[in-house]
Amino acid sequence: MADKVQFARLPDGREVAYRVMSGATGPVILHTTAGPFPLDLLEEEPMYDRFLRTLGGSGRVVLFDKPGVGSSDPIDRDRDFHGQLAAAHVAILNALDVERAWLVGSLLSALARTIQAHPTRVLGAVLINPISVDQQELVLDSTIKRDRSSKARHMTPSRADDLAFVAWTQRASRLGVSRDEWAAVLSADRLANKRFEAEAGPIQDAPPVLLIRRRDSMSRVSVDFWTRIFPEADSVTIEGADSGVMALDAGLVAELAAGFISGEPVETSPHRRLVAVLFTDLVNSTPAAAASGDEVWRSTLDRYEATLQRTIQRHHGTVVKHTGDGALATFPSGTEAITAAVELRITTQDLGLEGRAGVHLGEVEQRDDDISGIGVNLAARVMGEAGPGEILVSSSVEQTTVGGRFRFDDRGTRSVKGIDRPWQLFAVEPR
């Protein structure tokens, strides 16, 4: 159970709001959020909640509202912004009566400033998707030109089509900071980044771990920059193109960070990734084939497979393989997988056939052109529970797409063969 919001006082008398999110034994873990979202709302976002709960297994996770955001006092526009964040870190540790803590987050220059200014207060750091200062400038420019919540969508492409996620970022940003104050925070961050680039030299204290997503081009090309700043830093690469914490692999990112903090690093494969897995199948196809004859049936199947291929590709999916009268495919989001499944249901019925589908959001192992793992097995089991014409999804899909264009009918908790715990399943219907 998370503690209530409390306040730590800075040397100049201003206050920052903070909250202890987990009571696990272990070190304090200060997590600094990058966006304009207040700490009171972070648990409402499923991927952020997963990130916090997973990270909380390795220590006392403490969130705080940056100066200018949420319940914290406004920034001091005449002082270095990163210095104010460093002061916030120290003030929270003092309020908790804790000498040292781990730092976890993606405000790289700000966290580096804290390590540089207060090395005796930092146990270590996990820097998520490190981007260099000049690339931080590009992100700030793109954020300023769009609306306040656009940074989350821009930095999290895997969820750009997740309507529930987009709606949450818009609401949370409105509640988190005023337009004028957010502009002041971005401007202060820009100036602090430039100052850091001009002044920063090698930092030997508290060498961090650089956690990099392989297909995030900004992070990948910035490794040299950050290893010059932290010459003793380790780096770990995982799959993905997102920069934000709230990506679909939030659990994996937190698991890796927790492993470094606990001293028991998680073994990862560079081919391990988080995707929406879709299984499709035709129902009662054998009687249909017998009734229509081989030649007509083959022609119908050819049209079905061509339609299936086009539909999956149109919604940014990849056909991994055909499975008899169906297919196994992956998608970057649950919304794309469901949209493709709904279209396939219509086109399959137009061909005089009856299909079914199952969708699960989970991690898979990429093996050449094939995939494997519990995520694949669970998607297959979910489809196996579906009746003719049904699209069933696991709770992981429902949680990340609720509030979007689909409505879900709760089918209850099922014991799924081969899986060690029951899963809640939902039937999908378009709005």
Image (spheres, grey):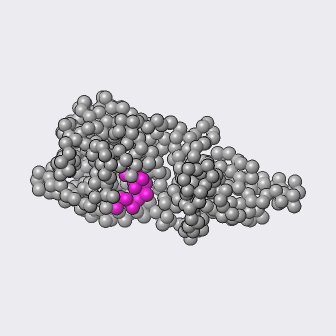
Left-right relation of 208 to 17:
right
**Quadrant hosting residue 208:** top left
Left-right relation of 390 to 113:
right
Q: Residue furthest bottom?
A: 431
Name the residue nearer the viewer: 279 or 170: 279
Height in image: 110 above or below 167?
Answer: above
Name the residue nearer the viewer: 7 or 234: 7
Residue 49 among those drawn in magenta: yes
Q: Residue furthest left?
A: 12
State the image coordinates of residue 194 (x, y, percent, origin top left): 24, 42
Q: Residue at x 31, y 58 (%)?
A: 2
State the image coordinates of residue 195 (x, y, percent, origin top left): 21, 41
Height in image: 289 above or below 254?
Answer: below
Name the residue nearer the viewer: 204 or 284: 284
Residue 290 among those drawn in magenta: no
**Majority secondary structure in the magenta region:** helix
Q: Residue at x 39, y 61 (%)?
A: 44
Left-right relation of 363 to 207:
right
Q: Residue furthest top?
A: 231
State the image coordinates of residue 56 (x, y, percent, origin top left): 35, 49
- Residue 370 shows up from this direction: yes
Give the quadrant of the N terminus. Answer: bottom left
Q: Residue at x 44, y 60 (%)?
A: 165
- Residue 359 shows up from this direction: no
**Quadrant hosting residue 431:** bottom right
State the image coordinates of residue 131 (x, y, percent, origin top left): 35, 41
Name the residue nearer the viewer: 47 or 222: 47
**Quadrant hosting residue 100:** top left
Magenta residues span: 41-52
Q: Residue at x 46, y 63 (%)?
A: 164
